[in-house]
Amino acid sequence: MPSARCCLRQARPSSASARFRKNRACAIPARVREAGQVSKRVAILLSGGGSNMVRLVESMGQGHPARPVLVMSNDPKAGGLIKAADMGVPVASVDHKPFGKDRAAFEAQLIAHLDAAEPDILCLAGFMRILTPDFIRHFEGRMLNIHPSLLPKYKGLHTHERAIAAGDTEAGCSVHEVTAELDGGPILGQAQVPVLPDDTADTLAARVLVQEHRLYPEALRRFAAGDRSRFQL
């Protein structure tokens, strides 16, 4: 069994991100009863800087049907963990590297941390590890992902390059439920942007990201309220 680097810690301010705290200060909403229902508990998985995570946490304010209970990463040094901690959200990490190709053992550690947080909903927000069918079954019906294409087009990687190469005039992003089929679960919502004649993959990605930051919070709000109908921004 690999000696994985795992950690679970309560949020503590970090001097390394003072500028971020100044601009993004946010408190976790208290667990409240609204319309006779307890707010849904949300855990978020990420691998990098966590820009979508930030928008999700910021959106879960007063009157929202959900609240953040954990942000977790496969990279103990992920910038998103610092941002989440500075926003008052408990954070944890399980470094995937010591596990090598043993994805089942790595995911067992993830599941142990996640189950301890008792999430009703699990949001993937730039989590760059392919999940096994067993992990997906464990969270079946309560796991969401955001993907930078107008699904079912361009599942997988390099979505913006592929959209430009195909001569598409529109691109965008999709939030979908996670199933065993890669990027193939039921689509909950989408947002579109034009593909401009002089676009590069980077310029298109930047424009799509703006829409991701609008789309994911709205999809989570609807999903937490029990609305799984498809919508368009």
Image (cartoon, rainbow, N blue to C red):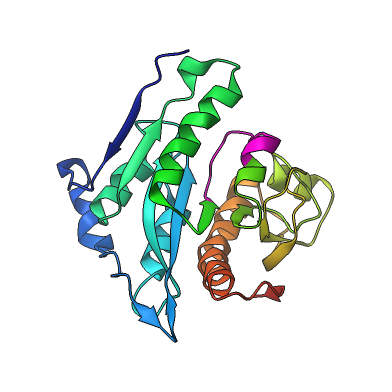
From the viewer's perspective, is 160 left or right of 217?
Answer: right
- Residues 167 and 81: in front is 81
Image quadrant assignment for residue 80: top left
Residue 17 position, x and y percent, is 22, 46
Residue 18 position, x and y percent, is 18, 50
| Main SS class of the magenta portion in the image | loop
- Any part of residue 49 in sight: no
What residue lies at 30% left-to-right and 53% top-to-bottom? 89
Residue 98 position, x and y percent, is 46, 15
Q: In the displayed structure, would residue 85 be above or below residue 78?
A: below
- Residues 42 and 170: in front is 42
Image quadrant assignment for residue 185: bottom right
What residue lies at 60% left-to-right and 57% top-to-bottom? 142
- Any part of residue 127 in sight: yes
Q: In the displayed structure, would residue 157 be above or below residue 32?
A: above
> How many numbered marks are there?
0
From the viewer's perspective, is 12 left or right of 47?
Answer: left
Q: In the displayed structure, would residue 139 be above or below residue 213?
A: above
- Residue at the right extreme of this rendering: 166
Query: Is residue 133 in the magenta section?
Result: yes
What residue lies at 53% left-to-right and 70% top-to-bottom? 224
- Residues 167 and 79: in front is 79
Residue 35 position, x and y percent, is 44, 87
What residue lies at 48% left-to-right and 19% top-to-bottom? 97
Quadrant in the picture for the C terminus: bottom right
The magenta region covers 124-135
Query: Is residue 183 in the magenta section?
Result: no
From the viewer's perspective, is 178 left or right of 210?
Answer: right
From the viewer's perspective, is 64 left or right of 11?
Answer: right
Image quadrant assignment for residue 188: bottom right
